[in-house]
Amino acid sequence: MQFESNVKVANKDQIWVVGGYGQVGQMICTQLGQLFPGKVWAAGTRMNRAEEFSRTTGGTVKPLQLDVRQAIDAVMLESVKLVIMCVDQSDTRFVEACAQSGTDYMDISAKVDFLAQVETLHKKMQHHKATAMLSVGLSPGVTNLLVREAVAQLNQVDEAEITIMLGLGEKHGKAAVEWTVDQMNATYTVMKDGKPTEVRSFQDGKWIDFGPKLGRRKAYRFNFSDQHAVARTLRIPTVSTRLCLDSRWITRSMAITKRAGVFSLLRYPSIRSGTVKAFGLIPGGEEMFAVKVDVAGWKQGKPVRVEHLLVGEREADATAAVAAAVAERMYHTELPHGVFHIEQCLTLQDVQQALPSLLNVVTVIK
């Protein structure tokens, strides 16, 4: 691991964006670089990529070589106020180093098992007066906040359904595509009637109303981490997250492929690799996303359903904008110490206030 000699300064005022030269990381760095010029570092294993990106920002964002898979001395983080993690990790050593140095930490990843590991560091973060913020982005992130908004409208909550529509016209980073492919054959546990229940990705299809423009779409279970988080943090007995694509026929084809057992072949590296490449070659589609949250419960003794619909362009841009907004909030405001998911510390309004343009959420209460 290499550090430039001028990385360490007296004040704890730097922001490290790990994976800062990747697709989403670049957007986060650019936005934060405008707010905190000279204090944002694009970090990653490939110094040439970091330097190349730094030059495109006119030096506003600085380059840093860093491998989070290797041990890091907490002393190296003494000048760092906030770390934003845009790459997947297999263990929590780096997060623990952040805790030990009193450095705040934000994670935009969505791996359920890893986020659960970070949650175990709650007391350590508290002890060192640091905050770790998980579930930051679109899903998880905005989805969590929309569920919180809906729950606030009710006296009792029975069920929350989260549905994500992704546009095939948007070209996602390799890591995001790999994660999606890896989840296609996943078996995982969700909360149903307050009890852990085993389900499988791309099964249990359900028709979801995405409003007059997009219409009704059939969506299928998918192992997004938001459903696991809000079931605990918001105490909801039944929670599910489903996925569909803007192409109805490709969504349907994937469901048929799942039923035929073809996704089980993804355990073979060559087939997995070919599938990842194929995703980048799918024609058509739009650079769009849609999020629908349906929460059912009771208010004043009557059954009530709260629906939130958000339609936007470019999911990666939305994730970066939300991450930058939360980072600005964490930089300027001392949030509670410990490990939290976004909905435990912030509201949708908190995030909206820091966004360059508001998320256009349409709410219907029935």
Image (tube, helix red, strand yellow):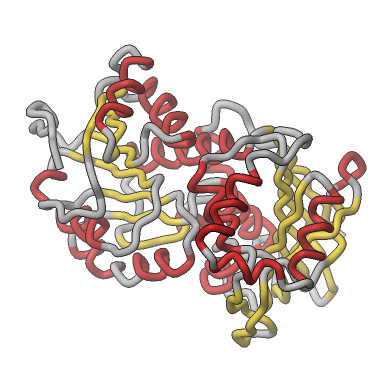
Q: Quadrant of residue 251?
A: bottom right
* Farthest front residue in view: 270
Residue nearer the viewer, 113 or 160: 113
Q: Is residue 256 left or right of residue 16?
A: right
Give the image quarter of residue 333: top left
Drawn side of residue 157 relative to residue 325, left or right: right
Residue 16 spot, x, y in % from top left: 28, 38
Q: Which of the 4 image quarters holds residue 161?
A: bottom right
At which x and y percent is residue 44? 29, 39
Observer able to see residue 22 = yes
Q: Please indicate whether residue 217 sits to the left or right of residue 12 in the image.
A: right
Where the N terminus falls, by quadrant?
Answer: top left
Residue found 25% across the figure and 50% down from its top: 68
Tell me where residue 360 appears, x and y as whole percent: 71, 36
Q: Position of residue 100 (x, y in %)?
A: 16, 58
User: How many numbered marks, from 0 up?
Assistant: 0
* View extreme (top): residue: 58
The residue under the point 85% across, 74% down is 302
Whether residue 226 is visible to the viewer of this picture, yes or no, is no
Rendered residue at 38%/15% (across/down): 56
At 35% across and 62% down in the image, what residue appears?
A: 339
Compared with 124, 328 (above or below) is above
The answer to whether residue 203 is left or right of residue 275 is right
> What is the quadrant of the C terminus in the image?
bottom right
Decide: is 207 above or below 203: above
Q: Is residue 15 above or below residue 237?
A: above
